[in-house]
Image: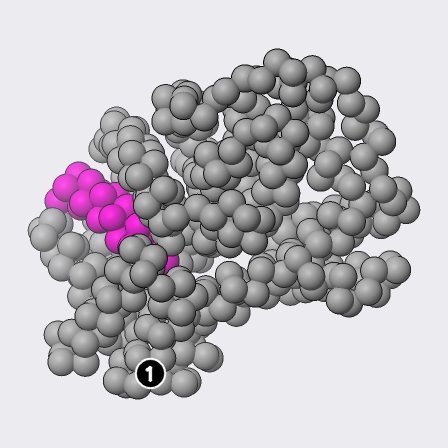
Amino acid sequence: MTFTAWLAVAVFLGAYTLIATEKIHRVAAALGGAGIMLLIHATDAQAAFFSESTGIDWNVIFLLLGMMVIVGVLKQTGIFEYLAIWAAKRAKGYPYRLMVLLVIITAVASALLDNVTTVLLIAPVTFLVCERLALPAAPFLIAEAMASNIGGAATLVGDPPNIIIASRGGLSFNDFLIHMAPMVVVLMVVFIGMCRFLFRKYFRYDPDRAAEVMALNEREAIADRKLLWQSLAVLALVMAAFVLHPVLHYEPSVVAVLGAGVLVAATRVTTQEAIREVEWPTLVFFAGLFVMVGALVETGVIGQVAQAAADATQGQLGLTTMLLLWASGGLSAIVDNIPYVATMSPIVAELVQGNGGNGSAQVLWWALAFGADLGGNATAVGAAANVVILGIAARNGTPISFWQFTRYGIVVTVVTIALCVPYLWLRYL
C-alpha cells in the first residue's frame, strides 16, 4: 500500500476508536476523520461528494430525510400512541412477549421495506410502550435494530447491499426469496430465543402498570383523524413504490422525498413542524462515515483486503464460500456494508465465473449477502439501521453507548453467521 493508504487507515482507526470509546461525540469524530481524509488527499471533493462508489451515498441521506419528515407528521396524529397501547395489550404487559411482538413486526416490515425506514417507524412506538410499562427502552431498540438487519436480508429490497449484489450477479427478487428467505426465518426464530437470554435482566413485569394499560382504549389516543388518514395514504403509496422499485425504477430516496413533500403540501402541518423530528446529527454522522470509508476504497485499502481474502482460497469453492462469509461479516462490522459490497462484488463476479458461472458457484453471492447483512449487527456503526436507532435514542433522552450495543451485537452476529455455515454447505456444496 502507498503511504497515503497507510495514513488513511490510521485516520480511520483513530476516528473509529473515538467513536467506540465515546471520548468525543460521534458526529465530531466522523466529521473530523472525513476532514483529515480530504486534507491528506486520501480522497478529494469529486470522490467524496459526487462519486457513486466512494462518495457520500445521497440516496441513503435523502431516504432518511424524507422518511423522518413523514414520521414527524405521523407523530402528531397520535398513531404511535395507539400502536403502543395495542402492542402492550396484545402482550398483556409481559416484557418478553412485547419484545417478541416488536421484533417480528420489525423483521417482516424490513423484508418488505428497507430496514432504515422500518426502525424509523417502530422506534417511536417502542418509546411509548416502554414508558407505559415502566421498561427501559434501550434493550428493545437494540433488539429491533438487529431484527431489522436479519429480516432485511430476506429480500432484494430489504437491505441496500442486496440491491448491489442483485445488480452485479444478475439476480432477481425471487432469487432472494428462494435462497435467502428460508434461512432468515430460521435465524429469526433463533434470534427470538436469544433475546430471552440476552435481555433477561430487563424483563421486569409490573402488574399494576400492565393493568393500567389493559384498561386503556387505544382509539382515544388518536388526536387528528383527518391528518392520520392523509398521512397513512401517503405512507401506503411510499411503501408500495418501495416494493415496486424493480418495476417503477424510482430510487427509494426519490420516493421518500416526494412523499414527504406531498404530505407537507397537502396538510395543515407547517414546514417547521415537519422538520422538527429530523435527526440532523444522524444525517451528518452518515455523511462523515461515508467520506471516511470512501477514502479507504479510493486508496485501494478495501480492495486489497478483499483481493487478499480471495487469493487465499486458491480457487476452492467450499473454502472460498466460508472465507467470504466470515470475512464479509467481520469487515461489515467495521465499515459500512454498502461500500464494502460495492467493492467486493466485482471480485465475487470473477470468482463465480471462474467456478463455472451459474450452478453451485452462485453460493458465493449468497455468502456475500449473508456475511454483509448479518455482519452489520456486530457493532453500533455496522449498519445504517443501528446508527439511526442510536440517534433516535439519544434524541429521546435514552442514549445507547457504542459498547452497550456492540456487546450484544457480536454475540448475535457470531451465532447467526455460524448457522449460515451448515445451510450454505449442505444446500450448495
- Residue 314 point in image, percent of width and height: 9, 51
Q: Would residue 159 be visible to someone looking at this image?
A: no
- Magenta region includes residue 261: no
339 lies above or below 50:
above
Q: Tell me: residue 223, above or below residue 96.
A: below
Does residue 328 show up magenta in the picture? yes
* Quarter of the image that includes the N terminus: bottom left
SS assignment for the magenta stretch, majority: helix
Pointer 1: what residue?
38
Q: Which residue sits at x=32%, y=61%?
A: 23
Instruction: Please tell me which residue lies in front, 238 or 205.
Output: 205
Residue at the image point whose x is 81% and y is 24% from the top: 217
The answer to which of 414 and 156 lies nearer the viewer is 414
Q: What are the residue bounds of the magenta stretch?
A: 316-337
Residue 43 lies, in percent from the top left, at 32, 81
**Numbered disc total:** 1
Which quadrant would the C terminus be assigned to in this image? top left
Res. 61 visible in picture = yes
Residue 211 rendering spot, x and y as whole percentages:
69, 15
In the displayed structure, 277 sits above or below 32; it is above
| Foreground of the two, 19 or 369 | 19
Which of the 4 quarters of the picture holds residue 127? top right
Apparent side of residue 87 relative to residue 108 in the rendered image (left or right): right
Q: Is residue 256 left or right of residue 358?
A: right
Secondary element at image label 1: helix
The single residue placed furthest to the front in the displayed view is 208
Which residue is painted at 25% across and 48% down in the image? 330
Residue type at tag 1: Leu
